Amino acid sequence: MTENTIKTVKVQKIINECKDAKTLIFNMKFNKSDNYIIPKPGQFVMVWVPGIDEVPMSLSGCENDGHWAITVKNVGECTNAMYNLNIGDYIGVRGPLGNYFKLPNESSKKIFLIGGGIGMAPLKFLSVQLSKRLMKHTIIEGAKNDNSLMFTDYFRESAKNSPEVHYCTDDGSSGIKGFTSDVFAEFLNEYTEKDHSNLIVYSCGPEIMLYKLFQICQKYKIEFYASLERYMRCGCGLCGLCVLDSLGLLVCKDGPIFSSETLKNVQDFGKYQRDFTGKKVNIE
């Protein structure tokens, strides 16, 4: 089997993460002889709900025994169908696809994971891997309100060992009132110009948020990686809906993780994406 072969898997566990998001856990490793590909943080899968649609979903976790996790926010027809699945229901999964967050080689790096909304899914996966390697890191999670904050139970427990977690909400109902980019900018006041070269930022969330973080990191010459989201039908470079102008890169094949060195040459970043007809539209 390859990463583009659909496997039919059974939902084995469901975790309620917040008011409108759930994590679905399923096993992708059927037997010892199975050609099993271990996913890495930042990669995604195409999830097929029979009779509905197939959509891309970031992986929010992976265990050594083959259990993978996706975290679903109820925002559309297909995600609504996934959100309402029960334990024992079946879905089709194809992957892992795309590239991934590369962990720093230097243990001295000061690592920030900055996410908004459902964008916290791949960052939670990344946080787990960093913690396993005993790599300290700081998480900044943003949401509209306290009902939309995700993985709070997990981070509360894991904070005893590794990540330092800071929350911010648009309405101030939990944590700091404001945006992740503002909170990160405040953190930078604690570092000297010399320290900036030792910082690294991994991010995922609304593209407007990613673009603001990118601008900050460009200004202070901070290493930056972002996971981009685009509409896609195939996940393997055929449909072209996820193309990034002007470089012609495909989010499904060349991403979804892009460095600031690439993003500074992407005219679409923070501005445009394509809808399901292929028409370029403004990013909101």
Image (tube, rainbow, N blue to C red):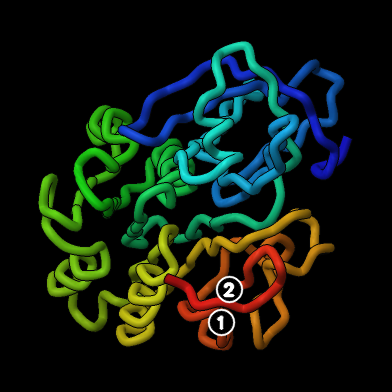
Q: Name the residue rendered at 52%, 61% in the picture.
A: 227
Q: Name the residue rendered at 49%, 36% in the picture.
A: 71
Picture quadrant of residue 78 = top right
Q: Name the residue rendered at 80%, 16% in the picture.
A: 31
For residue 17, above or below residue 129: above
Which quadrant of the figure contains the C terminus?
A: bottom left
Image location of residue 205, percent across then percent down? 42, 58
- For badge 1, the amino acid type reads Asp
Marks 1 and 2: CB-CB under 8 Å? Answer: yes
Sequence-earlier tag: 1 or 2: 1
Image location of residue 278, percent across then percent down? 71, 72
Image location of residue 232, percent across then percent down? 69, 58
- Residue, disc 1: 268
Determine the CA span between mark 1 and mark 2: 7 Å
Which quadrant of the figure contains the N terminus?
A: top right
Q: Is residue 146 left or right of residue 15?
A: left
Q: Residues within 10 Å of mark 1 (few under 14, many from 20)?
A: some
- Residue, disc 2: 273
Image location of residue 217, percent across then percent down? 35, 78
Picture quadrant of residue 12 = top right
For residue 192, above or below residue 37: below
Mark 1, secondary structure of its residue = loop
Mark 2, secondary structure of its residue = strand
Q: Nearer the viewer, residue 191 or 87?
A: 87
Q: Name the residue rendered at 64%, 16% in the picture.
A: 89
Q: Is residue 212 left or right of residue 168?
A: right
